[in-house]
Amino acid sequence: MTITTQKPLVRIEGLHKYFGPHHVLRGIDLTVNQGEVSVVIGPSGSGKSTMLRCVNLLETISAGRISVGDQLIGYREVNGRLHDLKVREIAAQRREIGMVFQRFNLFPHKTALYNVMEAPVQVKGKSKGDAKKAALELLDRVGLADRANHYPAQLSGGQQQRVAIARALAMEPELMLFDEPTSALDPELVGDVLNVMKDLAKSGMTMIVVTHEIGFAREVGDRLTFMDGGVVVESGDPREIIANPQHARTKEFLSRVL
Ligand code: ADP
Ligand code: MG
């Protein structure tokens, strides 16, 4: 349940995104409180990935603003004027945000352990000993303690995705973004990944999750947002929206994925 005294961690306000003449995001507003799980659904091409990529600085913003904590994403505000961030500052903002993609993007020639250790050592300057200890704990947390020395090709898709989650968590992000993390998996592997995400939600992590797993939205979501055509059509309590969608487009979409 959302408690009204909770603090917003993420504020997306009037977000627009153009790719050339193509107006992909048309004024998105979304607030995610600290510790909340915000689930986003919508048909293919509705702009879900683009929205996440704007939050994570993988795309520039055409108009509007995004803030995470007290940071304005992509900009620095000096005397009311916005300045573009330097590459180093973009990297610093991105470090605070973990992202898990549909495809696992692990380094194929490195073990699970190395995949999880790499960024804390290379980017954060952690000692190898500390990074290894933390990585083994994270692999244990995602149920893969016994797979630390396996290479990605020796792991199932679901195991690879759990390594990808551990790798994102190794950077100790304040926010985790998930872009259809289970949609490339065989059905029997989906549950293990969703269980890891449920545990993460219970631990208090703030998460934005793009998924078609309506059961996950119902069970762990604090908010459900339905996007279509680059706008938010409907947003609110997941259980209410699933049971009683207000808009024809939401109803039609849910009837296809339920
Ligand atoms: P979703 O994740 O909801 O399926 P996307 O955010 O991936 O939607 O895409 C929204 C729209 O933006 C689509 O029409 C897609 O073709 C377009 N789009 C996404 N990325 C780019 C890009 N880099 N260049 C041009 N068009 C893009
Ligand atoms: Mg997408």
Image (cartoon, grey):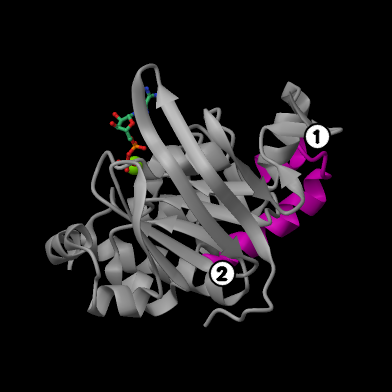
Which residue is denoted by mark 1 in the rendering? Answer: 80
Quadrant containing the C terminus is: bottom left
* The furthest residue to the top: 20
For residue 257, side relative to residue 94 (left or right) = left
Between the residue at mark 1 and the residue at mark 2, the CA separation in whole angstroms equals 30 Å
Task: Give whichever of 37, 118 is nearer the camera.
Answer: 37
Q: Which tag is nearer the camera, tag 1 or tag 2?
A: 1
Boundaries of the magenta span: 117-143
Q: Give the percent coordinates (x, y) of residue 175.
A: 62, 55
Q: Give the crowd class for mark 1: few <14, some 14-19, many >=20 residues within 10 Å.
A: few
Instruction: Give the residue type that dot 1 points to.
Output: Gly
Rendered residue at 31%/63% (across/down): 190
Task: Give whichever of 101, 232 is nearer the camera.
Answer: 232
Which residue is denoted by mark 2 in the rendering? Answer: 36
In the picture, residue 186 is in which quadrant? Answer: bottom left
Give yes or no for residue 120 being in the magenta stretch: yes
The earlier-in-sequence mark between 1 and 2 is 2
For residue 41, side relative to residue 196 (left or right) = left
Rendered residue at 48%/64% (across/down): 38
Rendered residue at 45%/69% (across/down): 223
Instruction: Give the residue type that dot 2 points to.
Output: Glu
Q: Give the percent coordinates (x, y) of residue 3.
A: 61, 81
In which of the image's four quarters is ligand 2 placed? top left
Q: Give the percent coordinates (x, y) of residue 168.
A: 59, 49
Q: Give the percent coordinates (x, y) of residue 35.
A: 62, 70
